[in-house]
Image (spheres, rainbow, N blue to C red):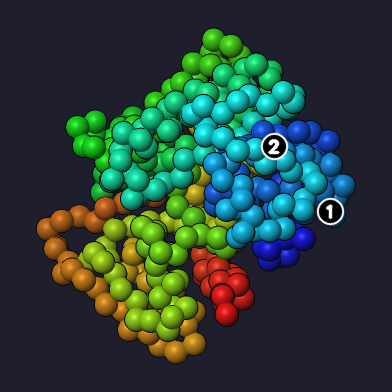
Amino acid sequence: MTTLPLQDLQHISEKARDALSLLRGKSLFITGGTGLFGIWLLESILYANQYHDADISAVILTRDPVKFFKTAPHFQEATCFTFITGDVTSFVFPKETFSYVIHAATEASDQLNKENPLLMFDTITKGTRRVLEFAKESNVSGFLFTSSGAVYGKQPSDLQHVSETYLNAPDPLIATSAYGIGKLAAEHTSVLFHKQFGLPIKIARCFAFVGPYLPLHTHFAIGNFIAQVLKNGPIHILGDGTPFRSYLYMADLTAWLWHILCYGTPGQAYNVGSDEAISIEALARLVATQAATALPIHIAKKKEAAIPPERYVPSTAKAQRDLGLAQWIALPDAISRTISWNRSHAKT
């Protein structure tokens, strides 16, 4: 049993067929398995096991499995998964052996980054070091670390797409740089383990996404817009609507992560996201088109012509060229699928 749309799981199975075949009969250790990325990875494993006899198993580290099972009870019945309680910075190493490790703990929590940046930084850096030590002991065949486009710092407004070769970083004198600098430090630690111990680490620098399970009431603009559509609007833009972002659908993201884990070059980083930029105002209007009736859009701030718009848009040329990846699901379709899923799962 899964809770994701069947067409999405079929899409992942098709696009990541070779990677999932390589994982057949393997055991994985996953941190962050109950977060947004983790749920999609676990759902795709369930589908591969049920429909393609993949026989993939996984041990998932989580702070609170009981809380997770309340929102996703079907995972408790999945015999291919074992959930263990622990903190990523101090968990007891499982005694089992694993072929692959996916370190996806520490999501981009804007609230934590503002209220307790030191905890954010420590969780990322100490947690990554702990997972790397465990992976080294396990002598794994592959290690995937989900990093972030935040490692690049502020993208210049005249740089259309930021590539993996762009050498910049978050401002270390700003407290809220804890997330980006933490991810950067964790990337460097991962590379040191690759160089010194031969650990086959691969890094996915993740940007912005949309799809089922995306939080709708946090700092994600696209999630907020979808939430407002579900309530029949209006749609509120908190800024001036000029920043540019790009969004990859979660089914595409999941296929990308499986590919990078299995076929990425050890010691290398890959941008993960869409390279199709859209302004926040245009995004709001695109989301509004999915409403049954026309919804008004309110923009809180006036545009300042002298100030160039911010950008957070990756170049994905490396992933496309080296791994054959692409944005297969267009943004309008991605938004439509996300809204439909949320409507069908709305609490009554």
Above or below residue 242? Residue 131 is: above
Residue ID at (82%, 38%)? 24
Q: Quadrant of the N terminus?
A: bottom right
Binning the other alpha carbons within 10 Å of mark 2 as few (below 14), some (14 to 19) or many (20 upward) gives many
Q: Quadrant of the C terminus?
A: bottom right
Q: Nearer the viewer, mark 1 or mark 2?
A: 2
Left or right of 55: which side holds 302? left
Left or right of 324: which side holds 189? left
Residue ID at (79%, 44%)? 80
Q: Nearer the viewer, residue 254 or 124?
A: 124
Left or right of 205: which side holds 75? right
Above or below residue 240? Residue 251 is: above
Above or below residue 67? Residue 223 is: below
Binning the other alpha carbons within 10 Å of mark 1 as few (below 14), some (14 to 19) or many (20 upward) gives few
From mark 1 to mark 2, how far is it between C-alphas?
A: 18 Å
Give the number of the disc on residue 50: 1
Give the number of the disc on residue 59: 2
How far from the left and from the top, in percent, is residue 308? 20, 55
At label 1, the amino acid type is Gln
Residue ID at (45%, 71%)? 226
Task: Check contact, mark 1 vs mark 2: CB within 8 A.
Answer: no
How far from the left and from the top, in percent, is residue 97? 74, 24
Which image quadrant for residue 329? bottom right
Is residue 20 visible in the rendered image? The answer is no
* Mark 1: secondary structure: helix
Residue ID at (57%, 53%)? 67
At label 2, the amino acid type is Val
* Mark 2: secondary structure: strand
Q: Nearer the viewer, residue 104 or 74?
A: 74
Which label's residue is closer to the chain start, 1 or 2?
1
Which image quadrant for residue 140? top right
Left or right of 48: which side holds 210? left
